[in-house]
Amino acid sequence: MPLLHPSDDISNRAPVWNAMAAFFLDNELQEIEISHIAEVCSLSPYSQKELERIMFSEVWPAFLPNLFAIAGEWSGWPEDFVIERVMKRYRRNRIYFSWRFNPLKRYCCGAWASVEKQIDVLRKNRSTTES
């Protein structure tokens, strides 16, 4: 089943977008921030592939410019701003190739691999304790 259009899924997307936007702050991600992003993503209804697509097809185009701004944002954005910015930059038919094939994405968001691993661990732990 394909991802819903973001405007039809704001309640699930907004927390994920907000967490992922931390990748684009003008400071280096710390382990606690990586863990927070993974926790938020692990609680979402999205698969790993869907989360990757959300990160690099929705959040990346909206917030990448902050990394190149002379005085970029470093403390974070309000959730309503994140929603507005992602929706403004969203393109339904954006061509997507894995971030692993894009040197700029690997450089800027290399910690995404750590987020993915933590999501797996969190979901496995959660399913084990629920069983």
Image: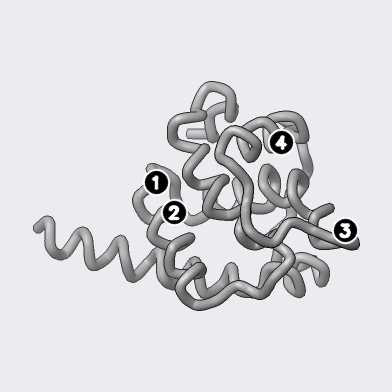
Farthest residue in the top direction?
A: 8
Q: Tell me if I can see residue 52 in this picture.
A: yes
Q: CA distance from mark 2 to mark 1?
A: 5 Å
Name the residue rendered at 39%, 46% in the picture: 44
Q: Is residue 52 above or below residue 27?
A: above
**Would you name the residue on which mark 4 appears?**
85
Asked if the residue at tag 1 contacts the one at tag 3, i.e. Cβ–Cβ closer than 8 Å, the answer is no
Residue 125 marker: none
Q: CA distance from mark 2 to mark 4?
A: 19 Å
Q: Secondary structure at mark 2?
A: helix
Whether residue 43 sits left or right of residue 56 in the image: it is left
Task: Answer with mark 4 or mark 1, whichever residue precedes in sequence.
Answer: 1
Q: Is residue 46 above or below residue 28?
A: above
- Which amino acid type corresponds to the residue marked 4 in the rendered image? Arg
Whether residue 114 sits left or right of residue 27 in the image: it is left
Asked if the residue at tag 4 contacts the one at tag 2, i.e. Cβ–Cβ closer than 8 Å, the answer is no
- Which amino acid type corresponds to the residue marked 3 in the rendered image? Ala
Q: CA distance from mark 3 to mark 1?
A: 31 Å
Name the residue rendered at 48%, 34% in the picture: 1
- Which amino acid type corresponds to the residue marked 2 in the rendered image? Cys
Q: Tell me if I can see residue 100 in this picture.
A: no
Residue 64 image point, x, y percent? 78, 54
Residue 3 image point, x, y percent? 54, 34
Residue 44 marker: 1
Circle nearer the viewer, 4 or 1: 4
Residue 51 image point, x, y percent? 53, 51
Q: Camera-side residue: 120 or 110? A: 110
Name the residue rendered at 51%, 38% in the picture: 14
Name the residue rendered at 75%, 30% in the picture: 88
Task: Answer with mark 2 or mark 4, whichever residue precedes in sequence.
Answer: 2
Residue 69 marker: 3
Q: Secondary structure at mark 1?
A: loop
